[in-house]
Amino acid sequence: MPKLRVHNLTISLDGFAAGPHQRLEYPLGEGFAGMHDWMFAAMRELAEGGTGIDVDRCRRAEENIGATIMGRNMFGPRRGPWADESWQGWWGDNPPYHNDVFVHTHHLRPSLAMEGGTTFHFTDESVETVLERAFKAADGRDVRLGGGASTVQQYLRAGLVDELHLAIVPALLGKGERLLDNLDDGIDGYRVAELVSSPAATHALLVRR
């Protein structure tokens, strides 16, 4: 049965998945620079045929993925109504997804087809409806849930996440957006299926019981 999976969601030791004041100059918020260094290094090693704990987690994130869901904060830095439709994401003409990507936003715009098979669909539907659309687009494969933290929280509260991979980096932020706040009982029913560490990050895999 297809799953909804979260991969490589990086958090600090004190639980922050983003710093404060996210904007164009600080896409992940102030103070979050360097938090994804473990992943960028692992992706380079993966491209070069390398191995290791971090490399393996990056490899897993690409396996059997047929569609992607993300929040508007992950798609771009702008808030409120679109001034125009010139913003097409952080990733250039050929984004790394190569599948249908469903972007949660209160401000709709036409679907955006990019090179490499990525098409962004902008939706204000419920998480249940968006996930149903994503599963249909994935055609039997799994769906990857990207950030930001508030989007992941919505799916956790709704009990829809099957696997949650957290990469905990050895840093304290002190402020920003916590991943595991405001979940009510959304984290109930999960168990830690895996906990391993590299010098750069500790990887925790939470799965449904």
Image (cartoon, grey):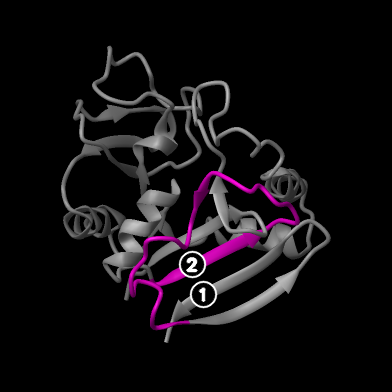
184 is higher (above) or lower (below) than 145: below
Q: Is residue 134 magenta?
A: no
Disc 2 designates what residue?
A: 164
The mark nearer the N terminus, 2 or 1, is: 2
Q: Is residue 130 left or right of residue 145?
A: left
Q: Which residues are magenta?
A: 162-190
Q: Residues within 10 Å of mark 2 (few under 14, many from 20)?
A: many
Image quadrant containing the N terminus: bottom left
Q: Residue 109 location in percent, x, y?
A: 20, 26
Q: Is residue 51 left or right of residue 159?
A: right
Q: How many marks?
A: 2
Q: Nearer the viewer, residue 73 or 171?
A: 171
SS at mark 2 in the image: strand
Disc 1 designates what residue?
A: 206
SS at mark 1 in the image: strand
Q: Residue 23 location in percent, x, y?
A: 49, 25
